Image: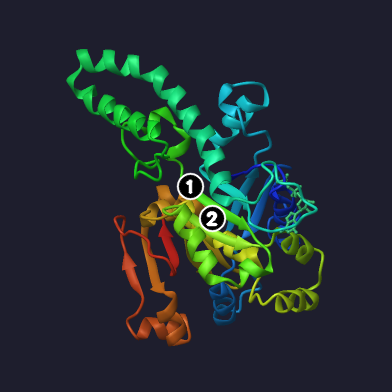
Amino acid sequence: SLTLGIVGLPNVGKSTLFNALTSNDALAANYPFATIEPNVGVVPLPDERLDKLAEVFGSAKTVPATVSFVDIAGLVKGASEGQGLGNKFLANIREADAICQVIRVFDDPDVVHVDGRVDPSSDIETINTELILADLQTLEKALPRLEKEARTHKDKRPALEIAQQAKEILDSGKTLFAAGLGKDTPDLRELNLLTTKPFLYVFNADEGVLADEAKQKELRDLVAPGDAVFLDAKVEAELKELDEESQRELLESIGQAEPGLNALARAGFHTLGLQTYLTAGPKEARAWTIRQGWTAPQAAGVIHTDFERGFIKAEIVSFDDLIAAGSMAEAKSAGKVRMEGKDYSMADGDVVEFRFNV
Ligand code: GDP
């Protein structure tokens, strides 16, 4: 499954956040056989639609989609100089599908900041610089080969040109993602450059910032086109230890409607370019994870590879139509249930039953 790699300077709250992301009881109940690596935190994607579906179908339980975060340990400054931990750090980031940087915006005289002051934009720059330098090294190694290939094969010219363009962007201090050369840029993919990955910024904030929308907008603008989330990692870690009633009280006391991990899960999903579709029956109401733009057979393959291979068609009703009708039978008689074929591209909130040959 796709993962976001958690990075950040020392003392910004990475471990605290990661602690809040792990040992999730609700998940253990739904995925009893899943082995979860110790450096992976899995967060359920909150989805109120599942409860409504469970009501309509009399489902015994609900199973949400999840988002995985990998804790990428390691020093950051000087990582691109390629020593010990630095190399491992970059290799781990290379494996992640998106980069999740934790940034300190909380004020606490007892917690030392590595650079002596809380300065989000300088923290972001420090991390970006290491990633940019690593990408430049990759490109400098690849360019001579690309030049040679382009001399002998005309059709290799676009690959050279895009690599040269990428180098210029990186030389100017920008990440490729920020410059619009994301992961899906043809001809750049094989180089697996770090800064083509989408970025999610987690601002580890205190109560003041959580209530300050103007400040949040300023920080959002700072990291655009990356996604941004604001939470208090310390509170998130505390919430994990509490029962539901006490959780509600703690959230209320700091003026938050829901745990910050909910927003983090939604943002992570968005950063990774994922979406869900829904299935429901007596056993469970469930959200399945697919990439945006996937077709019905690809979506079926997430449940079982046989479903993709033997795909005939998908019986689909939108969640809103289903709830408005009150039941599957009524949705059918109202003409709201569609039969979709192989080329159908899935929409968020599709409630689906696949027909397939085995
Ligand atoms: P890491 O080095 O990035 O993994 O940072 P840690 O998670 O170990 O946190 C460093 C210190 O900051 C610890 O003493 C945490 O308790 C504290 N800390 C983490 N998050 C917060 C926060 O949101 N507010 C405050 N006041 N302290 C925090």
Callout 1 amino acid: Thr
Nearest to N terminus: mark 2 or mark 1: 2
Figure check: 79 above or below 176: above
Residue drawn 41% across the image and 39% down it: 174
Relative to 196, does residue 80 appear above or below in the rendering?
Answer: above
Determine which quarter of the picture holds residue 247.
Answer: bottom right
Regarding mark 1 in the picture, which secondary structure is present there? helix
Task: Judge whether 84 appears above or below 257 on screen.
Answer: above
Looking at the picture, does residue 115 appear above or below residue 65? above
| Residue corresponding to mark 1 | 305
Q: Position of residue 133 (x, y in %)?
A: 49, 28
Task: Give coordinates of residue 204: x percent, y percent.
Answer: 65, 57
> Residue at coordinates 58% horizontally, 71% vertically from top-left?
212
Identify the residue position indicated by label 2 in the image.
268
Q: Position of residue 87 (x, y in %)?
A: 61, 25
Which of the pair 79/24 is nearer the observer? 79
